[in-house]
């Protein structure tokens, strides 16, 4: 299991509402912080909870779009994704898990 961080940029917002939403997930509690972006510590195991919660928030906000930057612990490369409520959550989850598990 590989761990990493996801930095979520919410255009035209400070991300506080999204951070509060994600903190409501038991598996993410204590792993969510707000800097210039919402930063979440994830593993390939917790990526499912993260993605489900993120897309629930996006559906609730309807017009919201976010940019994700995923960085694997100990690696220099990043995965960048843009998504919104109508994006394919399973595809985003697969991309995040695949990136985190990449050796």
Image (spheres, grey):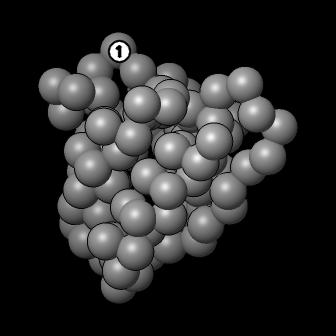
Q: Where residue 91 appears, x then y in whole percent? A: 40, 74
User: In this picture, is 43 found above or below 29?
Assistant: below
**In the figure, residue 60 lies in which quadrant?**
bottom left
Is disc 1 placed on a helix, strand or loop?
loop
Question: Which image quarter is the N terminus in?
Answer: top left
Q: Is residue 31 visible?
A: yes
Residue 44 placement, left or right of 11: left
74 or 65: nearer the viewer:
74
Query: Residue at point 27% right, 50% down?
Result: 48
Query: Residue at point 28% right, 21% down?
Result: 29
Q: Where residue 68 appears, x then y in whole percent? A: 59, 56
User: Mark 1 = which residue?
Assistant: 30
59 or 48: nearer the viewer:
48
**In the figure, residue 47 lies in which quadrant?**
top left
Query: Residue at point 50% right, 29% down?
Result: 3
Single out the residue that lies furthest toward the front.
Answer: 103
User: In this picture, is 83 found above or below 33?
Assistant: below
User: In this picture, is 87 found above or below 59?
Assistant: below
Question: Which image quarter is the C terminus in?
Answer: top right
Query: Residue at point 31% right, 37% down?
Result: 46
């Amino acid at each position: 299991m590989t761990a990493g961080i996801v930095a979520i940029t919410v255009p035209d917002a400070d991300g506080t509402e999204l951070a509060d939403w994600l903190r409501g997930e038991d598996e993410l509690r204590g792993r969510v912080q707000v800097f210039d972006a919402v930063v979440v510590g994830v593993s390939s195991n917790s990526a499912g909870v993260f993605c489900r919660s993120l897309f629930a928030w996006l559906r609730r906000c309807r017009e919201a779009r976010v940019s994700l930057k995923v960085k694997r612990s100990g690696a220099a490369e990043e995965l960048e994704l843009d998504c919104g409520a109508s994006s394919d959550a399973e595809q985003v989850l697969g991309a995040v898990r695949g990136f985190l598990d990449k050796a």
